[in-house]
Image (cartoon, rainbow, N blue to C red):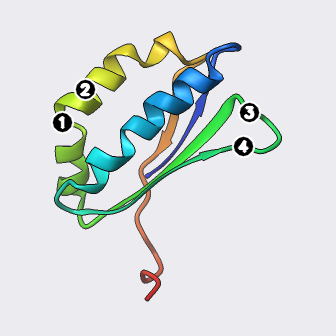
Amino acid sequence: MVGQARARPGQEDALERVLLSLVAPTRREAGALEYHVHRDRADPCLFVFYEAWQSLGHLKAHLQQPYIIDFLSRRMDYLAEDMDVRWLKMASSYAA
């Protein structure tokens, strides 16, 4: 999964803190292979997140975690527009 989140002006740092607070618990979940949050160097309002999961079932279970449900319920407090999320299927193999 790859997604983009654009912060409301003035909410950039708050959104970054919230997104980073999701990293550790997500990485501890069963099936989590990769979970990264990036901030665009040229546009500090733009965040990109990348997730890789062992299976679609693991990803769906992640989306049911209380801390994710909480974030999703209050995301628009921070966002200028809703997130653009792409559910991708890995075509290449993982790096060694």
- Distance from Cα at disc 3 to Cα at disc 1: 28 Å
Left or right, residue 7 beside residue 21: right
Q: Are marks 1 and 4 in contact (CB under 8 Å)?
A: no
Which residue is label 2 attached to?
69
Identify which amino acid the numbered label 3 is placed on: Pro
Q: Are marks 2 and 1 in contact (CB under 8 Å)?
A: yes
Near mark 2 (Cα within 10 A), the count class, few <14, some 14-19 or many ≥20, is few
Which residue is label 1 attached to?
65
Disc on the earlier residue, 3 or 1: 3
> Could you tell me which residue is drawn at 43 percent across and 89 percent down?
96
Observer-nearest of 61 and 30: 30
Near mark 3 (Cα within 10 A), the count class, few <14, some 14-19 or many ≥20, is some
- Answer with the quarter of the image where residue 56 lies: bottom left
Element under disc 4: loop
Element under disc 3: loop
Determine whether 92 is above or below 11 in the image: below
- Answer with the quarter of the image where residue 18 lies: top left
- Distance from Cα at disc 4 to Cα at disc 3: 6 Å
Which residue is label 3 attached to?
44
Element under disc 1: loop
Q: List x then y, in percent, for residue 78.
A: 53, 16
Q: Nearer the viewer, mark 3 or mark 2?
A: 3
Q: Nearer the viewer, mark 3 or mark 1?
A: 3
> Could you tell me which residue is drawn at 34 percent across and 24 percent down?
71
Identify which amino acid the numbered label 1 is placed on: Gln
Identify which amino acid the numbered label 4 is placed on: Asp
Element under disc 2: helix
Determine whether 85 is above or below 70 in the image: below
- Distance from Cα at disc 1 to Cα at disc 4: 27 Å
Which residue is label 4 attached to?
40
Determine whether 18 is above or below 55 in the image: above
